[in-house]
Image (cartoon, rainbow, N blue to C red):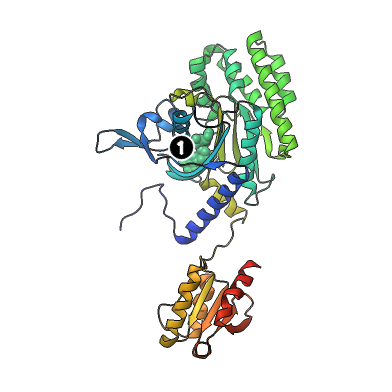
Amino acid sequence: MFESLPGFREFYPDQCAVRNHIFKHWKKAAISHSFSEYDVPILEPLDLYIEKSGEEIIGQLFNFKDKGGRDVALRPELTPSLARLIATRAASLKKPLKWFCIGENFRYERPQKGRLRSHYQLNADIFGELGASADAELIALCIRALTIFGLKADDFVIRLSDRNIWVDYLAHFGINDKQSIEVLAVIDKLEREDREHSLKKLKTYFGKGTEDVFEKIETLISLRTLEDFRSFILSQSLVDSNRCKIEARLVEWEKLFDHFNALQLTPYIQIDFGIVRGLAYYTGFVFEAFEKSGKFRSLAGGGRYDHLVEKLGGPKLSATGFGMGDVTLTDLLNEKELLPHINGTTSIYVIIGGEVERVKALTSISYLRGQGYAVDYSFKNISYGKQFKLANQSGAQLALIYGAKEVSENKVKIHDLSTGCESELPDNELKFELKRYFEK
Ligand code: HAM
């Protein structure tokens, strides 16, 4: 027997129903924030990801040569394709843009709990707004895309950080912009790697002073309030230019928190400089959403990437966005018992007395399907008892019975499958009765 490839996913109907439930609610959340839907190709030129996404993702690419000899890759994320889309029409698109997409991504990771080789993401991005109000709107949508399933502030947290502050702080130790991307990649992994291993990697950049710098990095990561952060910065002997840059960022942080307070989102937010994001293109505010106890891998991640559109040949255009994955979210919703029991797609099951009644029943079935109802019935002539069993298994709310008596009198019997209540009515009243029933 053939097996699917490691880390790739097959969806039986019950699993597909869960996936659809998640997509439906993600879409509802995005639309409630007035985001518009777009789509991009699944297969892209390999170059799109080289240098744009960063080391970690490049190592995880599914890439190959196509039959025309082109180097191509299955998309590991949506952001570079989206930035290209925007870059191509940047002049004619009315800003700010608020766009979303739900799509599959492929990463050659070691399959493990919460991380597979194929996953779906809700991506939401805002282009053309530099201020903290765009970051606030985006983080608000990220929170909405989780609370819409019934998750609460006790269940998850948005860990918020700032790449600009990190770059300005690292500059104090002589780290330039290019090196800071590499140092931040080490900091990104601190939580998952042992201290000695990280120290060794940082030695390349900080030499003899590595232990001292590392302690400072650890202190910065442990801070949880803006006040503590301010005191920390004051305690460091930064040169004026770096101190000014960091103070300017603090003004942005205050603006962001004014938004969170007004939107009543503060309980969901935790300041945490341990978040730096593994992807190379991030610039300012960055964040990740985690289940509160920290036992799951990230639910979502995102932040500002103000230079990517320009790097892809477009104009200078600010951008901020996030991606939320379906794998950890489904695990979390399962654990919290927040996934509805989705039992099939049928709403009406038609029970047929025998071959003679089948003609009448099929005419009715065809009519009802045309009216938009999801209708099912048995292909074979089987007993009423067996048909009722199938009706209950199908998840339908109503059964319509076309027995010999009903058909001869031009009537139909309606059986409510949850209450067991039955009523009989003339055929021509069925339409009104169903409308009344399904609209209540
Ligand atoms: P990311 O942090 O690489 O960001 O992925 C976002 C989310 O996708 C993660 O938090 C996780 O839930 C899910 N995810 C990532 N890799 C896997 C995997 N191998 N298996 C299961 N789930 C996974 C990005 O992709 C950015 N492009 C997001 C973004 C959009 N930034 C700006 N706009």
Which of these two is toward me, 151 or 36?
Answer: 36
Image location (x, y in percent) of residue 301: 56, 36
Residue located 60% across and 33% down the image:
287
> Taking the image as drawn, is residue 214 in sight?
yes
Residue located 46% across and 82% down the image:
360
Q: How many marks?
A: 1
Report which quarter residue 221 is drawn in: top right
Which quarter of the image is occupied by the N terminus?
bottom left
Which of these two is toward me, 222 or 78?
Answer: 78
> Taking the image as drawn, is residue 203 in sight?
no
Look at mark 1 in the image and give the residue it sits on: 77
Vertical placement of 182 versus 81: above or below?
above
Report which quarter residue 173 is drawn in: top right
Residue located 46% across and 61% down the image:
13
Which quarter of the image is occupied by the C terminus?
bottom right
Image location (x, y in percent) of residue 139: 63, 37
Q: Neighbour class for label 1 at 10 Å: few (<14), some, many (≥20)?
A: many
Is residue 409 rendered to the left or right of residue 10? right
Image location (x, y in percent) of residue 264: 74, 40
**Is ligand 1 within 8 Å of the beta carbon of the residue shown at mark 1?**
yes
Image location (x, y in percent) of residue 342: 55, 62
Report which quarter residue 52 is drawn in: top left
Which of these two is toward me, 168 or 182?
Answer: 168
SS under mark 1: loop
Vertical placement of 186 versus 173: above or below?
below
Residue located 65% across and 52% down the image:
150
Vertical placement of 231 versus 193: above or below?
above
Which of these two is toward me, 260 or 428?
Answer: 428
Is residue 244 rendered to the left or right of residue 35? right
Kind of residue sitting beneath label 1: Glu
